[in-house]
Amino acid sequence: MPFSDAVPSSDAEPHVRLGDVTHSYGEVTAVGPLSLDVPAGEFLVLVGASGCGKSTLLRLIAGFERPTAGEISVAGVSPEPGVSAGVVFQQPRLFPWRSVGGNVDLALEYAGVPRSERAARREELLVRVGLDAMSDRRIWEISGGQQQRVAIARALAADTSLLLLDEPFAALDALTRERLQEDLRVVGTASRRTTVFVTHSADEAVFLGSRIVVLGRRPGRIALDLTVDLPRSGVDPDALRGSPRFAGLRAQVGHAVKEAAAA
Ligand SMILES: Nc1ncnc2c1ncn2[C@@H]1O[C@H](COP(=O)(O)OP(=O)(O)OP(=O)(O)O)[C@@H](O)[C@H]1O
């Protein structure tokens, strides 16, 4: 494995800990109070209806926002923006005047990777997201799905042990979305990073998550906390999606999202 894959060493300490967290924007309480422990290496998917506070929760874990009340820790300390986690947003947010490889280089530079090591790391990352033949292309010369792959490579470049993704595939067509889900599932399992992924889709949640947390209507609280017992490697994605177990879990999560939104 070419990455250092540094995960917190202590099994006892969760990688991400939220203790009685509340977050308000002025009069609007968007989240909580909510407590949640995310163990190292878990692929947690947050699902819920629009406006229930999923993005707010992710921004709190990234350190972009501070909680109004309660405590958040990542690897035992308060989260620091740009340091504690790699983040992927719905829109790729790339530098359009730079090439594909140039965007990854910038992330490596920002992460403090020495110049002499950057070319090899860039190559590893582009192989990992299936873009190794496109390093010299400009951002406007590649598709939306490819741009989102560059965004994932950039988030992985920081080599943080935590990856946060906020509906990264929402704007993509169904086929591209399925391909990227399949790749992310493999990348997530192989890199052993702790991942928190936000989506509206029960289908996407069941395919990707090793655990699914459904949030209720604003202010977001936990309506369902489910361990997904589907195999994570050595399985054909289409066979997985077509399995009765997958259908059962998707129905359970979809039902919980609807119930939570109505409650
Ligand atoms: N910067 C902000 N200022 C004021 N209110 C905000 C801000 N960001 C979010 N909110 C409000 O907080 C609530 C939760 O928003 P948030 O974006 O976290 O929900 P979400 O579940 O991610 O929604 P969606 O699925 O539609 O993206 C909403 O009522 C939203 O209007």
Image: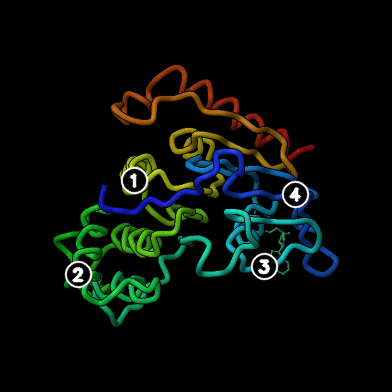
The image's colour scheme reads rainbow
**Label 3 CA crowd tier, 10 Å (few <14, some 14–19, many 20+):** some
Residue position for label 4:
19
Q: Helix or strand or loop: what does disc 1 sit on?
A: helix
**In front of the other: label 3 or label 4?**
4
Residue position for label 3:
65
> Residue at image x 61%, y 63%?
79
Residue position for label 2:
119
Of the residues shown, which amino acid type is indicated by label 1?
Val
Of the residues shown, which amino acid type is indicated by label 3?
Glu
Question: Which x, y percent locates residue 40?
Answer: 52, 43
Q: Earlier in the sequence, mark 1 or mark 2?
A: 2
Q: Helix or strand or loop: what does disc 2 sit on?
A: helix
User: From what the image shows, is residue 181 above or below residue 155?
Assistant: above
Q: Earlier in the sequence, mark 4 or mark 2?
A: 4
**In front of the other: label 1 or label 2?**
2
Tell me the number on the disc at residue 187. Answer: 1
- Residue at the extreme bottom of the image, as rendered: 97
Between residue 201 and residue 64, name the one nearer to us: 64
Question: Which x, y percent locates residue 87?
Answer: 48, 61
**In front of the other: label 3 or label 2?**
2
Of the residues shown, which amino acid type is indicated by label 2?
Ala
- Cα separation, mark 3 vs mark 2, equals 34 Å
Q: Any atom of ligand 1 within 8 Å of the CB at mark 2?
A: no
Question: Which x, y percent locates residue 126?
Answer: 23, 59
Of the residues shown, which amino acid type is indicated by label 4?
Gly
Q: Are marks 4 and 1 in contact (CB under 8 Å)?
A: no
- Cα separation, mark 4 vs mark 2, equals 41 Å
